[in-house]
Image: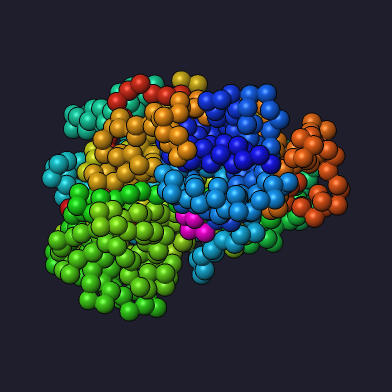
């Protein structure tokens, strides 16, 4: 091999690793054109393992020394830190360390070591971008996942109805206090607006008002509003319009039955008597006139429902319901076809590819760089700080604060918006912490502080702390072979001068999809914007005790599955469920997969999110260690060719043709030759990598299709909810 090949390779990799943004697209492969007409092609990375935010993998490379030369193929092996932006579902492989380069047919190891040494210094500035969907689909599923233990799976009270109904949750018996803003008594321990005028109780939900003489029952539609109710209604509608990007909500609300529950409950409903459809290739039927995931197994005649990622079975819709592990379901659940109407449940069926991908996704963090000097928190208490022991640890938890405050070894740690802070006093002052409490991983799910164990500190410098949180912080937990929402435990709220609610699992029909995680399912009403919830110091909605930080998206009932596989078009109004086509409420209003956005002193993927519009400036000239005056190369570009080149662990390059046949590159003859079947058999990961790459492309394509159209309106207002309790304080 000529020496010029190594010079070309050194130049290319140094250029690749020093040029910001040249690989900042998610399509593969990429081509960089060199100044002499040659080029280098980098193929999609093949991850081998993923632990915390560190990834190890390899990628195939091909180098053309001149414009007309035949390419030489090999592999680059790397380790990298993963920086993510879950709102856009993109990941950047940063601090790339090249651990090896292999070009079969190149025998001069000394020269190869020189290549590696030459690029090590530039590796710290690397930026190699890949979509999270590609990453999830291609990470080795056998690399190991961490399962949460001892979650609570007892069924909540499951209420079935065949009439359009709304479930009104109250956190225990109604707590009634005088609301100064309303100048009225109101129920404070509910996310719904319930207040009294004279002898009449008033409820706002689903865009409509209801009235009753009792909080617990007897609710009927109220079409004759008093002067006071009209004033409150105007303020609510104004806030709904603001939350909807300045657009009035045009959907016509639907009157429903009102069902009140003072204990954890879930509402399961059909529109009329249940109507069944068969699932091809199985003995399963699903209920087509319901937004719930309801099934009947013909063989056992049992009814199954999926709620918050957990399966429950019963002889019929009215129960009694019992928990069934996902690996104990009838075998036909795993045979539900991808791309079908009910494929969304596959993420909750043990052993399916969708379930394995959901577990991988649950371990990919949202990361951020926190400035020690400018990131702040303000911890408030209802009176003097009060602490109680955290079971199984020597730590204590503040009970009368909206922020998670933990006392450990004489120090105080607070978790606010996915960042650890510390202080020598429970009242501060607080500074960004470079460590977590030593026993944080021992916090049991019975504690309201359980989700803080999923907030991590990765690295520190004198100026910055690099942090991240996995979906567990937002309530998504790996539980055995699948993911579930919430711990299943009921946490007692704080009652004092203020009401501080706690996270909950039940009551909102949480269902999983591979892109936004957990979404609410409100049944047959018109959607999230009309439900009148309060978020911190919002309008007249009550304290929100749902998931941490930002409210999750509402799952519109017209979304009929097809999450996986080659998805066809998504139809609005499938004939079974009548949905007003004028209801164009964005299901992602105020939803954040990245709660670091717009936080002072916090940057994700090296962009300061507190300063809209800021982006890192791309490098205009690549570094050239051999000749600094040499003209720059052309930026890497996506090319219109199949992303079908892979490398094995020996650095050999393989290509899969349209017929599924494997060919191996011979660098000496510069030709593709039929691969030895024995080599393919020994490299089973090649077939797996090919299948996973195709699946990742499908996932990414489906995600792009599912995204709502860009909005030109002003961004939604930030939500000031606390990270742990999920609700604003209320007198």
Residue at image coords 45%, 43%: 126
Q: Is residue 454 left or right of residue 435?
A: right
Tell me the magenta residue range.
51-56
Closest to the observer: 477 or 615? 615
Per the picture, the main secondary structure of the magenta-coloured stretch is strand
Residue 404: image x %, image y %?
29, 61
Residue at image coords 57%, 53%: 113
Q: Is residue 327 left or right of residue 386?
A: right
Placement of 619 over or under 547, stated as above or below: above
Closest to the observer: 369 or 426? 369
Q: In the image, is residue 52 part of the stretch drawn in magenta?
A: yes
Residue 111: image x %, image y %?
60, 49
Placement of 612 over or under 550, stated as above or below: above
Which image quarter: residue 241? top left
Q: In the image, is residue 424 part of the stretch drawn in magenta?
A: no
Closest to the observer: 16 or 331? 16
Q: Is residue 484 visible?
A: no
Residue at image coords 25%, 53%: 463
Residue at image coords 39%, 59%: 458
Q: Is residue 272 left or right of residue 90?
A: right
Closest to the observer: 353 or 570? 353
Q: Is residue 629 left or right of residue 658?
A: left
Residue 224: image x %, image y %?
28, 28
């Amino acid at each position: 091999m000529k020496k010029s090949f190594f010079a070309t390779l050194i130049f290319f990799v140094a250029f690749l690793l020093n040029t910001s943004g040249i690989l900042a697209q998610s399509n593969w492969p990429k081509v960089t054109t060199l100044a002499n007409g040659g080029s280098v092609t980098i193929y999609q990375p093949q991850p081998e393992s993923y632990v915390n935010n560190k990834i190890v993998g390899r990628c195939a490379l091909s180098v053309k020394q001149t414009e007309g030369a035949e390419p030489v193929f090999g592999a680059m092996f790397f380790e990298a830190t993963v920086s993510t932006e879950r709102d856009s579902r993109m990941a950047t492989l940063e601090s790339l360390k090249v651990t090896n380069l292999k070009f079969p047919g190149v025998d001069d190891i000394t020269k190869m070591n020189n290549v590696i040494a030459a690029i090590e210094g530039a590796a710290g500035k690397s930026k190699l971008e890949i979509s999270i969907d590609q990453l999830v689909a291609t990470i080795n599923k056998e690399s190991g996942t961490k399962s949460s233990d001892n979650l609570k799976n007892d069924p909540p009270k499951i209420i079935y109805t065949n009439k359009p109904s709304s479930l009104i949750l109250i956190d225990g018996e109604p707590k009634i206090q005088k609301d100064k803003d309303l100048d009225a008594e109101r129920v404070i321990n509910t996310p719904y607006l319930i207040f009294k005028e004279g002898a009449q109780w008033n409820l706002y939900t689903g865009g409509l008002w209801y009235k009753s003489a009792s909080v617990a029952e007897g609710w009927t539609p109220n079409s004759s509003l008093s002067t006071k109710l009209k004033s409150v209604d105007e303020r609510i509608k104004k806030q709904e319009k603001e939350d909807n990007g300045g657009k009035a909500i045009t959907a016509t609300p639907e009157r429903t039955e009102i069902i009140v529950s003072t204990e954890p409950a879930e509402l399961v409903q059909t529109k009329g008597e249940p109507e069944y459809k068969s699932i091809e290739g199985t003995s399963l039927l699903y209920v087509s006139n319901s937004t719930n995931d309801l099934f009947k197994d013909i063989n056992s005649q049992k009814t199954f429902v999926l709620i918050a990622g957990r399966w429950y079975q019963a002889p019929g819709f009215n129960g009694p319901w019992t928990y069934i592990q996902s690996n104990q379901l009838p075998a036909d659940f795993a045979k539900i076809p991808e791309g079908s109407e009910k494929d969304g449940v596959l993420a909750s069926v043990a052993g399916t590819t969708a379930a394995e991908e959901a577990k991988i996704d649950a371990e990919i963090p949202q990361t951020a760089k926190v400035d020690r000097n400018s990131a702040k928190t303000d911890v408030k208490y209802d009176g003097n700080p009060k602490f109680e022991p955290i079971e199984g640890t020597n730590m204590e938890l503040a009970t009368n604060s909206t922020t998670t405050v933990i006392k450990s070894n004489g120090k105080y740690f607070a978790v606010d918006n996915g960042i650890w802070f510390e202080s020598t006093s429970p009242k501060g002052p607080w500074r960004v912490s470079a460590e977590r409490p030593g026993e944080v991983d021992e916090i049991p799910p019975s504690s309201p502080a359980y989700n803080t164990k999923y907030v991590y500190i990765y690295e520190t410098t004198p100026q910055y702390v690099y942090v991240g949180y996995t979906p567990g912080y937002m309530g998504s937990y790996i539980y055995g072979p699948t993911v579930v929402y919430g711990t299943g435990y009921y946490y007692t709220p704080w009652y004092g001068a203020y009401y501080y609610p706690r996270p909950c699992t039940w009551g909102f029909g949480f269902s999983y999809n591979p892109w936004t995680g957990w979404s609410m399912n409100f049944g047959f009403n018109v959607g999230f914007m009309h439900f009148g919830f309060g978020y911190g110091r919002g309008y007249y909605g009550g304290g929100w005790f749902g998931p941490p930080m930002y409210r999750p998206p509402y799952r519109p009932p017209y979304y009929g599955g097809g999450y996986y596989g080659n998805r066809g078009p998504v139809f609005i109004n499938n004939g079974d469920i009548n949905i007003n086509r004028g209801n164009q409420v964005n299901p992602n209003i105020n939803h954040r997969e990245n709660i670091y956005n717009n936080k002072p002193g916090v940057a994700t993927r090296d962009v300061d999110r507190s300063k809209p519009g800021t982006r890192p400036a791309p490098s205009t000239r690549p570094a050239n260690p051999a000749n600094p005056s040499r003209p720059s190369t052309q930026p890497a570009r996506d090319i219109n060719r199949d992303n079908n080149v892979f490398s094995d662990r020996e650095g050999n390059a393989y290509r899969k043709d349209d017929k599924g046949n494997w060919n191996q590159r011979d660098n000496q003859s510069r030709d593709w030759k039929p691969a030895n079947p024995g080599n393919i058999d020994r490299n089973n990961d090649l077939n797996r990598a090919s299948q996973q790459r195709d699946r990742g492309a499908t996932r990414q394509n489906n995600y792009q299709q599912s995204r709502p159209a860009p909005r030109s309106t002003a961004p939604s207002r930030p939500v000031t909810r606390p990270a742990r309790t999920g609700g604003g304080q209320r007198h």
